[in-house]
Image (cartoon, grey):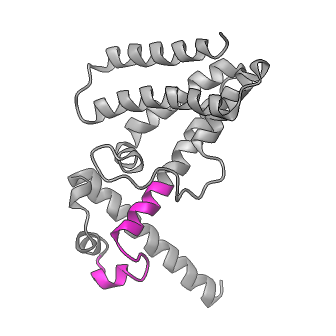
Amino acid sequence: MGSKERIQRLKEDNRNRILEASLQIVKEEGWQALSMRKIADIIEYTAPMIYEYFANKEAILTELANQGYLLLSKKVKEAKSGEHIAEKQLEAMWFGYWDFAFEERELYQLMFGVGTACCGFEKTYKCAESHGKLISDVIREIMKHQKPTEDLICRKYFTYWSIIHGLISINLVNQGNGDITNQEVLKDAIYGITRSLTD
């Protein structure tokens, strides 16, 4: 390995360490506790050195949100691949979305502004195939005989999203009704909206 490649790998390693330290702080103390000084303490660097990798704390948050969107898209795609009927794919994708929200609680809070400042949804998202596009494509497939407009597909997507995100948000701020009730509400919402696509 040449010196340029070694330097590049070292930079990538340092960048990843900064992001991992940031997430560690957030998981232990919450988003409000994140600071360049705390990150520097964990990775044993000086705070000014972190600025060589990220312009400011917002740049770190944006990168973490981007990582979250990549993970969410992967989760949704995997859920889809386990089913062969479009309606079942759609339901599995939303259940995958739900699972992601609780498996990656801190990233979800950052991505969608639950109890924290939001990173602008997918505006800075680098992945070409977002979870929203993956889900909308399946909605379009289910509704193809109706020849739906893009506005209608968008409306159906946001009908799902508003209900599921709302239920997730309620639970993330500790106002939920317990796992069994949540699962029943989630199933009712997903199955009900899915049925409406073919009405």
**Magenta segment, which residues?**
44-66
User: In the displayed structure, does residue 169 sit left or right of residue 85?
Assistant: left
Query: Which quarter of the image is occupied by the N terminus?
Result: bottom right
Position above or below: 141 against 134:
above
Q: Which residue does the image show at 39% across and 61% down from the upper left?
A: 61
Quarter of the figure with residue 125: bottom right
User: x%, y% of residue 124?
Assistant: 52, 59
**Quadrant of the snapshot with the C terminus:** top right
11 up-or-down from 22: above or below: below
Vertical placement of residue 61 versus 163, above or below: below
The verdict on residue 172 being magenta is: no
- As drawn, is 153 to the left or to the right of 115? right
Lateral position of residue 157 relative to residue 139, left or right: left
Q: Residue at x 45, y 67 (%)?
A: 16
Magenta segment, prevailing SS (helix, strand or loop): helix
**Picture coordinates of residue 93 (x, y %)?**
57, 29
Using the rendered view, name the quadrant where residue 45 is placed: bottom left
Nearest the viewer among 16 and 70 is 70
Residue ID at (41%, 75%): 54
